[in-house]
Image: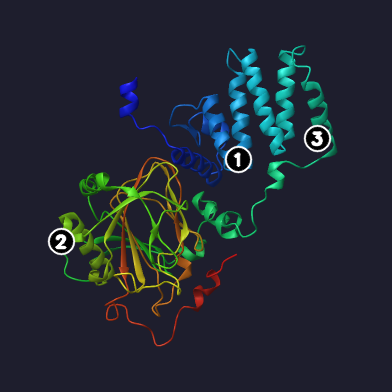
Amino acid sequence: MAGHRENLSFPTQEDFVGTALAMTRLQQTYQLDVGELASGMLNGIKYGAAMSWQDCFVLGQHLYSMRDFNNTVPWMQQSMQLLVKQSYSKDSEALDFMETVMGYHESMGDYENALHLINHVLAVQPDQRLHLLETRAHLEQLISDGVKRGLMHEVARSPDDYHISREYRVYQQVCREELRPAPAAQRYLRCRLFAGNGRKSSYVPYKLEELHLDPYIIQVHDVISARDTAELQHLARPELQRSQVYSRTGHEHISANFRTSQGTTFEYTEHPIMQKMSHHVAEISGLDMRSAEQLQIANYGIGGHYEPHMDSFPDSYDYSLNMYKTNRLATGIYYLSNVEAGGGTAFPFLPLLVTPERGSLLFWYNLHRSGDPDYRTKHAACPVLQGSKWIANVWIRLSNQDQVRPCELQRDHEISLPYMDFK
């Protein structure tokens, strides 16, 4: 055992916190029932092993320590429901533990579940637990009077908390496919074979599907092979590190809870497959890939996500310390895997959800022709519900694109301004 302890890597506090956040993120985004989630069921499909009552309690305990009291309640409740089903649930030790959990519910202001546990304990050991009679009477009085106090009611979210904003609710609805583009917006969309913008190395045309016309968003199918996607995963896996984002000033990269994935970067010249990927983007878009950032390969595990964000940078961004110097004109996402459930790319303002399809390329412009940000292209990676999501990000800067995508005579950015500060 001593040897195993030296060689094994045990979960850290950060691992526990990350798991707790991922579980509640899936629960809230996809409106999952806690009982089903604990049993390993996702939308009626059995995916994994069931959680024990101890698992549910530990998760609830971590949520409590994180002061996420509304999510603590259902996991504590689920823990006790599972404990009651155990053969030893009427032992004194188990009843003592139920009293402890009752204290959690009472402190949070969840008087109904606290009362339910007290009644259960008193039904098993009425004579040995007389001290609970006074607590029961007190809770019954609070419930009768309609008293709302406790941590759930006293610790309210700040009004400017993004996670209670209208934009965030819309994003979750798009991930659940409750919001879809209006039929009128899809009437003129088409699929077609596209020869490309230059000299292709193959006579096989691209299978181009229009997903949105303004802003223009396309998904090109079967761009790279399954063998190539597997090779890219193999190349990236040893190099993966926690994904980071640019700070607001652009001076540094930082980790953030709103983006939970692992990633690494490559020069396109490092491998023939990556050179082909660059060539395909150039052929499909007509853009000058000499202004492209390094290829970024990223992996999202279960619960992995990236909240709504713009790929382009705000006016306050400082380009002086950035080697690329100009804004991100366009984004391409190569999907390197299918995803069993969840993990779509959501555009809340359109509202559009793109399903990952292995080997395909999703492409759009982040900027209007005027160079202003197109706020309608704010997008997100919905949480992965089941499976593992692999992507490769292509970001193309504005430099050297004036001949390929010239400005119009008039600025054309007004149409997206209502989404700049969407409330």
349 vs 143: above or below: below
Q: Residues within 10 Å of mark 2 (few under 14, many from 20)?
A: few
Closer to the eye: label 1 or 2: 1
Q: Position of residue 69 (x, y in %)?
A: 63, 41
Res. 90 visible in picture: no
**Dot 1: what SS?**
helix
Q: Amino acid at mark 1?
A: Asn
Residue bearing the label numbered 1: 71
Q: Quadrant of residue 319?
A: bottom left
Of the numbered discs 3 and 1, the one sitting upstream in the chain is 1
Q: Amino acid at mark 2?
A: Ser
Q: Position of residue 117 (x, y in %)?
A: 70, 24
273 vs 422: above or below: above
Q: Quadrant of residue 114?
A: top right
Q: Position of residue 126 (x, y in %)?
A: 76, 13
Residue bearing the label numbered 2: 202
Assess whether mark 1 and mark 3 are in contact (beta carbons under 8 angstroms): no
Q: Quick check: 213 left or right of 63?
A: left
Residue bearing the label numbered 3: 143
Q: Amino acid at mark 3?
A: Ile
Q: Residues within 10 Å of mark 1 (few under 14, many from 20)?
A: some
Q: Quadrant of the C terminus?
A: bottom right
Query: In the image, what residue occupies the spot 69% across and 42% down?
Result: 151
Q: Quick check: 124 left or right of 388?
A: right
Q: Position of residue 225 (x, y in %)?
A: 22, 50
Cα separation between marks 1 and 2: 54 Å
